[in-house]
Amino acid sequence: MNEHEGQNLLDFLATGINKKDPVIQAVLSDYEGHGATANEVTELVAFIDYYTRTDDVKKHEEESLEMIVKQFTKLRKQLEESDAVLLRRMRALTERACDEIWGNGPNMEHVFETYFGGIHAYVCESTNEESFLQNGDFEEEEHWIVADGAAYTADARFSKKRGLSFHGASGQSCLQTLTEVSAGVYTLHFFLKGKCGVIIQNSSGKYFNADEKVLWNETANPWQTAPVTNWFEHDDWRDAFCFVVLSTETAQLKIKFVSTGGREAYIDYVRFFLKPKNPSYTIVIQYEGYALEDKTLHLGKGTVDPIPGLDYSKESYFDTSYIVGRKGALQGVVYKSVLDAVRPRGIQSFVEFAERTETEP
């Protein structure tokens, strides 16, 4: 008996049928196992073997990959999305960038940067509050007093078109004065690349020392007569913040950024707000957009207008929820759904979008 008997479709034909008939061999199979039906059956068997015996999701493709992703993460394949991107999004949620600890700040940043690709994510002190500072993005010429070579430049932008730039010389500064600031605990929050100082002075002429050892010491007074400069330093873009405690209302509160000799500084996205009673955190998503008129297109891909015929100069993109994805129509809710999936339970958190224009204005 032939040891391969029963493995070729010809072996299942009735004995009266001519197995050498070219039509039979073309439609079913020849003695080598090739033919229209045989080829389809071979592929089917291979797929069943691959689907049922392949335990590594990275080896799955197309329909089987979609089914696995949908089963374990509820994600759906987006328009024109490749298998590689779909797999990356799944692994962002299920492997969490291979971090040993899930749910902490670095892990949250890794998840968002992996999931969306082409963005930067920053876990920050809760910034989803109303800021008392005006022009915190340095897009206008008003509200701040810049001196001794400090300037607004495109190189210093973290968001939108420009930011505050210190070019390494000492004595450069940028000042804004707030009036009638009520008692309370406030947060001064900004993004920094380089090194800068912050001088905070009240209407009595006293300076605030934001050092934690002084700030939370029951016997020490953080408001001091001698000048105090609070220093911050990051080699790359990173958020910086300090708490400011006002025990009584002050008629004026001066917030002044100052340079240090020998080290450049880029400063942008400055906020000053009341510290919430139940503080949380905010994930700031920074991405590249491109400028049109005086707007920045939110998450637009390439240089092709995604909605032909729309006069963008008359649109307010945030107000009209103009947020589109790099691979299809990703609305802001997608970011929030990912945040809800990976944030620690019971902790409220927020997402902010910081759009950074690709082109120099």
Image: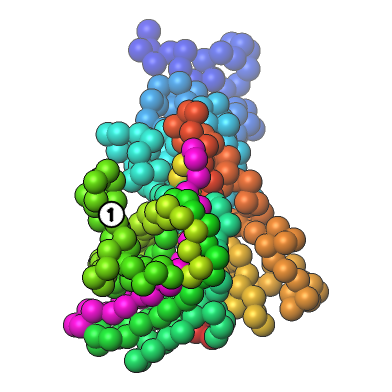
Quarter of the image with the N terminus in it: top left
Q: Which residues are magenta?
A: 253-278
How busy is the neighbourhood of tag 1: few (under 14 within 10 Å), some, or many (20 plus)? Answer: few
**Residue at position x 19%, y 82% in the image:** 262
**Residue at position x 54%, y 46% in the image:** 350
Q: Amino acid at mark 1?
A: Asn
Q: Is residue 273 magenta?
A: yes
Q: Is residue 246 left or right of residue 223?
A: right
- Looking at the image, is 41 positioned above or below residue 321? above
Q: Is residue 33 left or right of residue 37?
A: left
Which residue is disc 1 drawn over? 221
Rendering quarter of residue 231: bottom left
Rendering quarter of residue 324: bottom right
Residue 179 is at least partly visible in this image: yes
Quarter of the image with the C terminus in it: bottom right
- Looking at the image, is 361 positioned above or below residue 156? below
Name the image colouring.
rainbow
Q: Please state the horizontal and vertical placement of residue 326, each as a whole percent of the image.
A: 57, 59
Q: Nearer the viewer, residue 301 or 334?
A: 334
Residue 160 is at least partly visible in this image: no
Q: Please state the horizontal and vertical placement of residue 323, each as a whole percent of the image.
A: 65, 59
Q: Please state the horizontal and vertical placement of residue 4, each as a whole percent of the image.
A: 39, 16
* Predominant SS of the magenta segment: strand
Q: Please state the horizontal and vertical placement of residue 6, each as a whole percent of the image.
A: 47, 13
**Residue at position x 44%, y 27% in the image:** 50
Q: Nearer the viewer, residue 79 or 192?
A: 192
Q: Is residue 302 magenta?
A: no
**Residue at position x 43%, y 86% in the image:** 146
